[in-house]
Amino acid sequence: LARRLHGIEPTIFSAMSALALRTESVNLGQGFPDTDGPAAVLDRAREALAQGRNQYAPGLGVPELREAVARHQQRHHGIDLDPATEVVVTTGATEGIACALLGLVDPGDEVVLLEPYYDSYVAMLQVVGAVRRPVTLRAPDFRLDVDALRAAVHDGTRLILLNSPHNPTGTVLTPEELAVVAEVAVRHDVLVVTDEVYEHLVFDGRRHVPLATLPGMAERTLTLSSLGKSWSLTGWKVGWATGPAHLVGALLAAKQWTTFTSGSPLQPAAAYALDHEDAFPAALARDLQQRRDLLCEGLAAVGLTPRVPEGTYFTLTDVGHLGWEDGAAFCATLPERAGVVAIPAQGFYDDVEEGRHLVRWAFCKDEPVIRDGLARLAGAR
Ligand code: PMP
Ligand code: GLN
């Protein structure tokens, strides 16, 4: 194995989903829904295959999806983009993350990121040889410590890798917190890559504010999103990156040598989803809010009072409340004790102590599945 991959564990999400299958456990681990996205979107994909949309797309993606992404950013966020130069289709946000870092970060460059982090960030930061500067969102509120952020970013920082709504805490950064991110990025002339895949999945009347809409940020921000979460099509791996041409160009410079271009036939269907299925993520968010409350009440009832998330479809609990020293040990034995799978969060921290007791639960599953999982937890040994 190449040194650049040494020490990077296999992704916990695959490991825990395999464990769920093997042990016939209720999977409250990996974040994917039990129910697929809109039927009309699935129909468009079948049509695209039948109509022969089966050869290479242009490197930036099929024009109709790039145009739909630009319209989506304008309609939801008031962001104006030129689909010819400021939008690139990616194979999920995961490829967007990888190619953004490959295209923008040199060995030894400092990258400031929120901790706990999404696992692919750290793997790819290691691959590109970056130096990580984590800023910890601390229990129990998991808010951004703006002083810690101000202290972490300096003139030599290459980029800030942001994620809001935030996986795994469920924190949605407030306009005030985002303003501090913008302030430090502008002051120190730092680029930002912001992962906004949960942009539509926010609760209790909150609104997600894209960082790119803050003063001074449009020219230095690359925004990543995807169809997977908001339209319940995680297996399609259709994502996009938007921002100024120089940042989209840097991502494309790497993407042309990784995938060259993303799969064609799902792109027209994704364009249809963006243009005609705004109601889907809106209804999903309302529904998820109820499932969030169901999960949070059930977890509280077994002594695992969770952080009530503001967005995403995850929540964190402290298994120290049940006397467990270690969230990984708790999760490793949970299938046999309860027939349930959850995700230990300690791998999402440089500061392992900070995350040692934390376990993540997903509420994107169908309501009967969540109820089953909670009933099993209530009867756990
Ligand atoms: N970023 C975050 C924060 C995620 O939770 C996920 C998982 N959906 C991704 C990126 C990857 O998204 P995709 O499936 O579109 O590659
Ligand atoms: N984003 C999903 C999660 O956090 C999983 C995606 C993956 O398995 N890589 O659960």
Image (cartoon, rainbow, N blue to C red):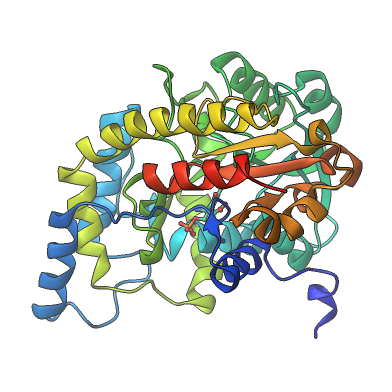
- Residue in the image at 52% along x and 21% along y: 215
> Which residue extends farthest bottom?
1
- Residue in the image at 58% along x and 73% along y: 22
- Position of residue 296 in the picture relative to residue 140 (left or right): left
- Position of residue 267 in the picture relative to residue 380 (left or right): left
Vertical side of 115 occupied by 40: above or below: below
Vertical side of 236 occupied by 294: above or below: above
Does the rendering let one see residue 16? yes
Which image quadrant for residue 76?
A: top left
Number of marks in picture = 0
Does the rendering let one see residue 160? no
- Position of residue 170 in the picture relative to residue 91 (left or right): right
Q: Position of residue 323 (x, y in %)?
A: 86, 37
- Residue in the image at 85% along x and 70% along y: 7
Q: Position of residue 44 (x, y in %)?
A: 13, 63
Q: Position of residue 105 (x, y in %)?
A: 71, 57
Q: Nearer the viewer, residue 111 or 202?
A: 202
Which image quadrant for residue 15?
A: bottom right
Ligand 2, image quadrant it occupies: bottom right
